[in-house]
Image (cartoon, rainbow, N blue to C red):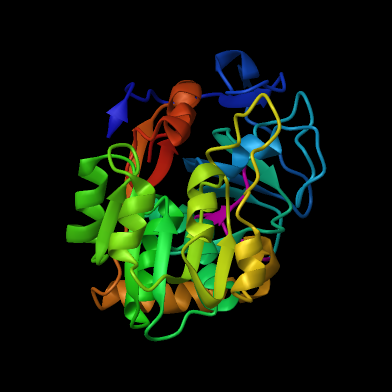
Amino acid sequence: MKGAKIKNVAMNKQLLFVKRPQGEADASTWSLETSAIPEISEGQILVKQHYISLDPAMRGWMNDAKSYIAPMEIGSVMRAGSVGEVVASKNPQFEVGQYVAGTGGVQQYAVTDGKGFYQVDPKLAPLPMYIGTLGMPGMTAYFGITEVGKVKEGDTVLVSGAAGAVGSVVGQVAKLKGCRVVGIAGGAEKCKYVVEELGFDACIDYKNENVASRFKEECPKGIDIYFDNVGGEILDIALTRLRMNARIVICGAISQYNNKTKIKGPSNYLSLLVNRASMTGMVVFDYATRYAEGAQILGKWMAEGKLKSREDVYEGIENFPETFSRLFSGDKMGKLVLKVIED
């Protein structure tokens, strides 16, 4: 566990979104406020939040632009996935003492009507895992590679952000489906982790290697699926390596989220035409009714030792801005999580 020591909480600390960033978000983007722990009304529950999920998509939510989800309003609690304990309930669907995951925001106590929250069991898996491999990142990876990527045995699969929360699961699922899997990550340590711990066939260090040359070496016959988490130049190079009927899954574009200028799009898109390939956007919310199915499959693989999960946990709600920046500096491994309250 890294970061400042957490003290006992008598009040509720909330991180409010106060300024839309231009480029990278910094400490001035948010304001940490303290107030009384809120009372609940009929139909509501009070969740004592233990862990907050930090995800690259959060940067996009700050923009005042049309997207798959409404932009955050100035003055609102910073939107984020979370997991914690029900400490008060006036909702018959939830009992005090249950643990739940949902979108509780960056705050120590959250009041909700329960919509979008679901029960989790800390005896079956550590709480951070429910906002990682058994939560939205895991669902993104599973449905992204199986439903959108239409993965099948014998495919050559290329995954960017391979050491991250989504990419690490994508590659492992593809291996379980009988594919050759090549990852892309930043730095020798991450590449070693991807190959030796996660079982990828190879990993390309985009910070220290010639990506185009390494693509040719590791995918000499081309790629059937490219699972894209970064966008930009790497996406453009991947387009040159497509096989006939290849599928590109557009999950994210972390290299572009902090741009102050227009997003850089691919110039090699005609490869889609030549190879009768497809490029499809993937938003995990489209599979919300199937989360239980995905969690059951991923959980079974984890219990069997076939799927590994790694959470990079930091501590202290006041350390949110610094921890959030790790998403874009690459100074983290696996799923980035912030602990905001004592157990």
Question: x%, y% of residue 123?
Answer: 34, 64
Residue 96 magenta: yes
- In depth, the one of 186 and 41 nearer the eye is 186
Tell me the residue at 21%/42% (across/down): 188
Q: Tell me if residue 86 comes above or below residue 158 in the rendering.
A: above
Judged from this view, the residue extending furthest toward the bottom is: 153
Question: x%, y% of residue 102?
Answer: 60, 53
Tell me the residue at 48%/57% (across/down): 238
Tell me the residue at 48%/21% (across/down): 318
Instruction: Write down the quadrant of residue 106 in the picture.
Output: top right
- In depth, the one of 50 and 54 nearer the eye is 54
Quarter of the image that includes the C terminus: top left
Range of the magenta residues? 93-105
- In depth, the one of 24 and 47 nearer the eye is 24
Question: x%, y% of residue 283?
Answer: 66, 60
Tell me the residue at 58%/77% (across/down): 147
Q: Is residue 178 visible?
A: yes
Horizontal side of 253 relative to 326 (left or right) equals: right
Magenta stretch: dominant secondary structure = loop
Q: Tell me if residue 160 comes above or below residue 297 in the rendering.
A: above
